[in-house]
Image: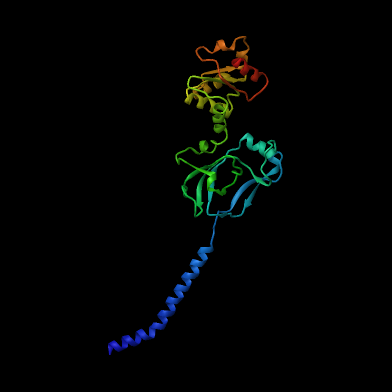
Amino acid sequence: MASLVRSATLRALKPLCNVTLNDAVLRRSQTLSVRAFSTTLSPPSKAVVYEQHGPPDRVTRVIELPPVEVKENDVCVKMLAAPINPSDINRIEGVYPVRPQVPAVGGYEGVGEVQSVGSAVKGLSPGDLVIPSPPSFGTWQTYIVKDQSVWHKINKDSPLEYAATVTVNPLTALRMLEDFTTLKKGDAIVQNGATSIVGQCIIQLAQHRGIHNINIIRDRAGSDEVKEKLKNLGADEVFTESQLEVKNVKGLLGGIPEPSLGFNCVGGNAASLVLKFLG
């Protein structure tokens, strides 16, 4: 009797079980279909934009940007730091012959953290620290979506202020040391504008490579402190312009060989002083 009751109960429940199973399969199928057509979007972003060239305090404004689709080869990066360089200001002013199409987002370099990646991206994962490869426009925004080829993974221990500023001035200094002549350990270079960021990078790179560096700075209050700072960075010699108003500047070099390369970023009399070392 109990067996008959169980059989009757199962027969009674069977249609209900079939409906539940079919319903679950249908819902699963619908879910898979929705997922197949869903896309990954970046979070909304804030950005500093300009719609025409001119003084930054007049032509820039902060706006909200809508989410952007993260395609299969794209990487969405949350920007952590982006500097304001003189070159950024000049670009907004329209000084350079090569200009980004407006409206444009300001900023040329920076550092960020990977937020999400497209399905075909390899070598980058959420949480990685990355910098954009130059030329890269539009770093003055909270989220950026660009192709994976734009981003370079860096060590997570890198200080943000260093990582955010590595692609403009340090790379400029590197190219200046490598693109004009072949410098060997023991050679010497001379530069004016030594207190600029590029100048300070040249000092450090030259010292690292065993290249003597002679540096020229302007006459101004605190020049002794400036000399000390540059020597702490690796400068072999630092002269003010007035110190070089002598007939034989090479006599000031001691054991440093005659420079084989000179850099001028100032012009005028400071450029003539560089030439005196090279002539």
Determine which quarter of the picture holds residue 171: top right
Q: Indicate the quadrant containing the C terminus: top left, top right, bottom left or bottom right.
A: top right
Q: Residue at x 61, y 35 (%)?
A: 85
Task: Kindly identify the residue that appears in the image at 67 percent across and 18 percent down.
Answer: 269
Residue 32, how many percent across, how many down? 48, 66
Query: For the image shown, how many numbered marks are present on the structure?
Result: 0
Residue reaching furthest to the front: 182
Image position, residue 186 (x, y; %): 48, 19
Quadrant hosting residue 101: top right
State the image coordinates of residue 261 (x, y, percent, origin top left): 57, 21
**Which quadrant does the N terminus fall into?**
bottom left
Is there any visible trace of residue 213 in the rendered image? no
**Towards the viewer: 180 or 51:** 180
Q: How is the image coloured?
A: rainbow
Say if 160 sits above or below 14 in the image.
above
Q: Which residue is nearer to you in this view: 192 or 224?
A: 192
57 and 98: which is toward the camera: 98
Please determine whether, in this image, residue 275 is positioned above or below residue 43: above
225, above or below 107, in the image? above
Q: Is residue 166 above or below residue 252?
A: below
Where is residue 58 shown, x and y percent of the image?
71, 41
Residue 240 or 135: which is nearer the viewer? 135
Q: Is residue 12 visible?
A: yes
Give the left or right position of residue 31, taking residue 269 as reference: left
